[in-house]
Amino acid sequence: MPLTPDRKKALRSLGHNLKPVVTVAGKGLSEGVMEELNRALEDHELIKVKLMIADREVRHQVIGQLCEQSGAELVQEIGKIALIYRQAEKPDPRLSNLLR
């Protein structure tokens, strides 16, 4: 279910103070990166991903692939940082960035 504009606005405000927890570098979306991304999304639900890719078009394509493969939704993209969200099956209040 796509995020509504109001929900995106609320998630952007929550994500403002977050630090990137996953970094995608020159090798792109390797299996290890996807495992770490899925673990981070399951734990935190709302995360920032840093993309160390210089070309803007390639970076945008990688973000699209990242969201498609993980089942997450892009909340915001600013420069080399993407804020993504995926609701956890069983959110842990100690880890979730939404339940704090």
Image (cartoon, rainbow, N blue to C red):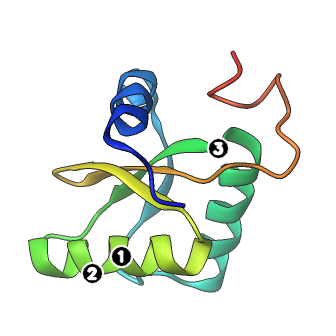
Describe residue 74's horizontal placement relative to residue 60 as left or right: right
Is disc 1 in contact with disc 3, using a CB cutoff of under 8 Å?
no
Q: Quadrant of the C terminus?
A: top right
Disc number for residue 61: 2
Q: In which quarter of the image is the N terminus?
A: bottom right
The residue carrying pointer 3 sits among few (fewer than 14), some (14 to 19) or many (20 or more) residues within 10 Å by Cα, namely many
The residue carrying pointer 2 sits among few (fewer than 14), some (14 to 19) or many (20 or more) residues within 10 Å by Cα, namely few
The residue under the point 20% across, 81% down is 58
- The answer to which of marks 1 and 3 sits earlier in the sequence is 3
- The answer to which of marks 2 and 3 sits earlier in the sequence is 3
Disc number for residue 88: none
**Which one is in front, 68 or 62?**
68
Disc number for residue 64: 1
Please tell me whether mark 3 sits on a helix, a strand or a loop.
loop
Is disc 2 in contact with disc 1, using a CB cutoff of under 8 Å?
yes
Is disc 2 in contact with disc 3, using a CB cutoff of under 8 Å?
no
Report the residue marked by disc 3.
Answer: 45
Rendering coords of residue 31 (x, y %): 64, 84
**Which one is in front, 87 or 25?**
87
The residue under the point 67% across, 51% down is 40
Residue 63 visible in the picture: yes
Please tell me whether mark 2 sits on a helix, a strand or a loop.
helix
Rendering coords of residue 30 (x, y %): 55, 84
Rendering coords of residue 47 (x, y %): 52, 43
Give the vertical position of 70 relative to 23 (above or below). Answer: below
The three-letter amino acid code for the residue at tag 2 is Gln
The span from disc 2 to disc 1 (Cα, nearest Å) is 5 Å
The three-letter amino acid code for the residue at tag 3 is Glu
The residue carrying pointer 1 sits among few (fewer than 14), some (14 to 19) or many (20 or more) residues within 10 Å by Cα, namely some
Rendering coords of residue 82 (x, y %): 34, 52
